[in-house]
Amino acid sequence: MSTATKPNHIGRKISRIRELRGMKQEALAMELGISQQSVSLIEQSETIEDEKLEKVAKVLGVTAETIKNFSEESMIYNIQNNYDGSNKGANSISISNFNCTFNPLDKLVEAYEEKEKLYERLLQAEKDKVAYLEQLLEKK
């Protein structure tokens, strides 16, 4: 029994491009005006009609030819050779800007400070409980 995938399975290519674009099936369905189940069926189909393929390609921001010729290898090649995000190849998917718009260290420090504040609040809550219990014991 062979587990190899068929090289020209259009549905799988659509699924992979959608995933690379960070799009959920629900979002693609909404843009196409169909149900999420219909998108699932499209992604399971080995072939789809050219008209439908054009609509899907437009929503995904690529051409129908890009979907037909899509391969993981060509995508990786294009990312490596077009690191600036320019769309030079016929099979390439436009790449989003990978530059950080924030300093990752600032985010790390911010997260640490939030955890520290949470710890302080939890510690204060425990101290308040102890004080309350001590007051109850003194009254007896």
Image (cartoon, grey):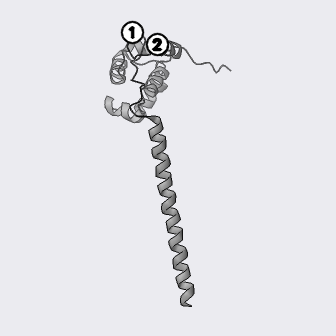
Image quadrant in which you'd find residue 55: top left
Q: Nearer the viewer, residue 106 or 9?
A: 106
- Residue occupying image coordinates x 53% and y 64%: 123
Identity of the residue drawn at 49% across and 41% down: 108
Residue 120 vs residue 82, the one in the foreground: 120
Residue carrying label 2: 78
Q: Dots 2 and 1: beta carbons under 8 Å?
A: yes
Amino acid type assigned to the residue bearing label 1 in the image: Lys
Residue 30 horizontal/vertical position (percent): 33, 34
Q: Is residue 89 above or below residue 117?
A: above
Quarter of the picture holding the N terminus: top right
State which quadrant residue 14 falls in: top left
- Say above or below: 68 vs 18: above
Q: Which residue is mark 1?
A: 88
Q: Secondary structure at mark 1?
A: loop
Q: How many marks?
A: 2
Question: Distance between the Cα atoms at labels 2 and 1?
Answer: 8 Å
Mark 2 residue type: Asn
Please give the label number shown on residue 125.
Answer: none
Quadrant housing residue 47: top left
Tag 1: Cα neighbours inside 10 Å, few (<14), some, or many (≥20)? few
